[in-house]
Image (cartoon, helix red, strand yellow):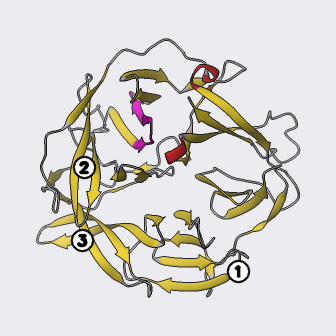
Amino acid sequence: MNFRLLIFYLTLPFLISGYNGIAKSELMTIQVPNKTDDAILLSEMAITVKKIKLETRDGVFLGHIKDVKLHRDRLFVSDSKISIFDVEGNFMQFLGKQGEGPGEYQRVNSMDIDGDSGRIFVSAYNKLLVYGPDYKLIEERKLDYPIGYVKVLDGDVWLVSEKIGIKIGDHFANQTNIYKLNDNFVISDTIPFRTIILDQKIIGGYPFRYWLSNIEEGLFMFMPVLTPENMMRDTLYQVLGKTLKPAVKFRFERPQSLGEREYQTLLLYNMVNSSSYYLLEYDQDWKRFMFLYDKKKELGYNLSEGLLDDNGEPVFVRPLDLKQDVFYYIKKAAYIDSSIEEQNPEITIVKLK
């Protein structure tokens, strides 16, 4: 399976409805050029904080890593499950159990950690599991809606839910809402984000999800649309109460278009907002790009595949602590012996300058 683009198209024709609960405002606009800048060394943009080689042992083989969290000198690494390592890379244990029974999950969609209480929140389709700082399950809720993303802010649990294929007359809708839960895990606030009307069901997705960015200026939202449409969803929104305010528009010089098979030729996957940078992850003509914008210098860098590490190889940095401009990147181990399992990767933590 090609994880660079985890998209399944069932059919193509569509219509798009307007946004709900979104306040209008004058937009800050940042241009994304069609040309690619010269390669930039990671060392020019960031300070390396720590390199962590993850231990490989029997039964501890990581698949395609989707997310990494750092809390209390522990790394929480999510592929289909969650593996816990110390900051030297030693494997400690798995979080929870995989399965279909009570207290188990089949596949992790998203995870987050409450920095104050140490509670760990895991979403697995429509199941929300909460673990204590001792990694023991303390709460399990099966909800009547899917959970695509979970974020904990000041003790409050925020969820992003996308319901697929809601029947509306002769059409189907993909509907996205932001939910805020109370202490009993019941919805206390709902922010309608987007409804897309389709002729038939279309499913799209991408494994790396960074939909909510929390920095000193507030909470920001970007969620991609990965179903075929000849337009760009290129705006970052700020969450203000029960509304979403457009905050920044990234105007791509290259216009959107559909290829011969009706695929989008320009796909924007993630838009991350840190204290000092905006970071965009996108594909153009099936090639990966990073657009990194320095807020202080008001300068953008459009880079093929990412920044270059010490070996001259491109790496893509992903968020770890947005308030502190701290990111991480994953480097696969060299594959030496085809008769044994591939070694677990190295994770490098960096702080952008």
Q: Residue furthest top?
A: 38
The three-letter amino acid code for the residue at tag 2 is Leu
Q: Which residue is mark 3?
A: 166
The part of the chain drawn in magenta is: 270-284
Cα–Cα gap, marks 1 and 2: 44 Å
- In reply to whether residue 70 is colored magenta, the answer given is no
Left/right placement of residue 70 relative to residue 1 reads right
CA distance separating discs 2 and 3: 16 Å
Residue tagged by mark 1?
Answer: 136
* Image x and y of residue 103, in percent: 63, 84
Q: Position of residue 233 (x, y in %)?
A: 26, 42
User: Is 34 on the left or on the right of 279, as rendered?
Assistant: left
Report if residue 275 lies within the magenta region. yes
Amino acid type, label 3: Ile
Front residue of 83/259: it is 83
Q: Nearer the viewer, residue 283 or 211?
A: 211
Q: Which residue is mark 2?
A: 12
In the rendered image, the quadrant that contains the C terminus is: top right
Q: Is residue 93 above or below residue 342?
A: below
Residue at 63% in and 80% down: 104
Q: Earlier in the sequence, mark 1 or mark 3?
A: 1
Please name which of the two marks, 2 or 3, marks the residue nearer to the observer. Answer: 3
Residue 125 shows in the view: yes
Picture coordinates of residue 209, whole percent (x, y): 47, 52
> Helix or strand or loop: what does disc 2 sit on?
loop
